[in-house]
Amino acid sequence: FEVPRTHEHQARSTKLAIRFATLTIAPPRPKKNHAVWKPLPLQVVLAEEVDPPEGETAVSWLLLTTMPVTGYEEAVQVVLWYSLRWLIERYHYVLKSGCRIEELQLETAQRLERALATYCIVAWRLLWLTYEARQAPESSCEVLLQKEEWQALYATIHQTPTPPEQPPTLHEAVHWIARLGGFLGRKSDGEPGVKVIWRGLRRLEDIAATWRLLHLTEPPATFG
């Protein structure tokens, strides 16, 4: 099972022991002239890490759900859904802190919907980049960057006017982008997160635009 990185432990592959049971929560005693609530049946799923690494806090998740859990596979599915919680939180973090959607001042609901649709794509792309660089680090960075972008990135990071012929890997490019955003890359820092990659991408846009202007193969069109 892939455990996501949290403030309590590093991301790692681990083995979880999963147990489940049904629990019925009794309603509070009703007051006079108030509605009577029915008992609430819930499914309880307990996921506990087996043999955690030395020095690491063992994973222990006690989950309550209204989803049906009648067997092991359904219990595992509940745990898998819960493990996506941190990814969903990062997605909303990008929308709120990066795209600043809460600060939008648009006059109509239609304009707001269009803006949100655009920013949702931006947030998804950023998250995809962050995690794709970890899952497929040896992929070419051209799955993300245009030629002029990775050339400008390489030249900026390595302080050279001559980038290589072959594009760097996705892992290398993402680390360089993160460095533009303030990532230090120390051993204890782990992999760069969405915040520094977001900052780096914004800087890279300006750097790549300048690179294109300096490497025009044809003179720009003139008018008049």
Image (cartoon, rainbow, N blue to C red):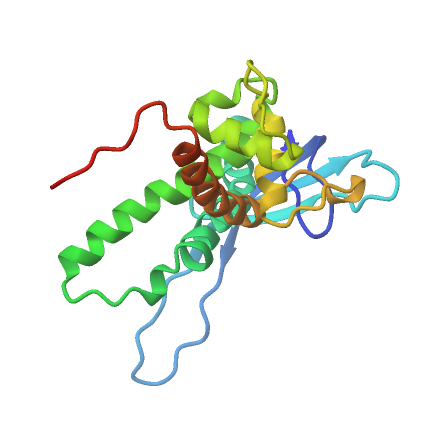
Residue 149 percent coordinates (x, y): 46, 31
Q: Is residue 108 above or below residue 181?
A: below
In front of the other: 220 or 158: 220
Q: Is residue 197 above or below residue 30?
A: above
Residue 112 percent coordinates (x, y): 21, 58
Q: How many marks?
A: 0
Residue 160 percent coordinates (x, y): 63, 30
Image quadrant in which the N terminus is located: top right
Visible residue check, residue 22: no
In front of the other: 98 or 214: 214
Image quadrant in which the C terminus is located: top left
Please identify the quarter of the rendering in which residue 36 is found. bottom left
Q: Is residue 8 above or below residue 54?
A: below
Which residue is at a point 66% across and 42% down the rendered structure image?
5
Please identify the quarter of the rendering in which residue 135 is found. top right
Which residue is at a point 39% across and 55% down the rendered structure image?
99
Visible residue check, residue 150: yes
Residue found at the very far front of the displayed protein? 224
Which residue is at a point 58% across and 29% down the rendered structure image?
161
Which residue is at a point 44% across and 40% down the rendered structure image?
210
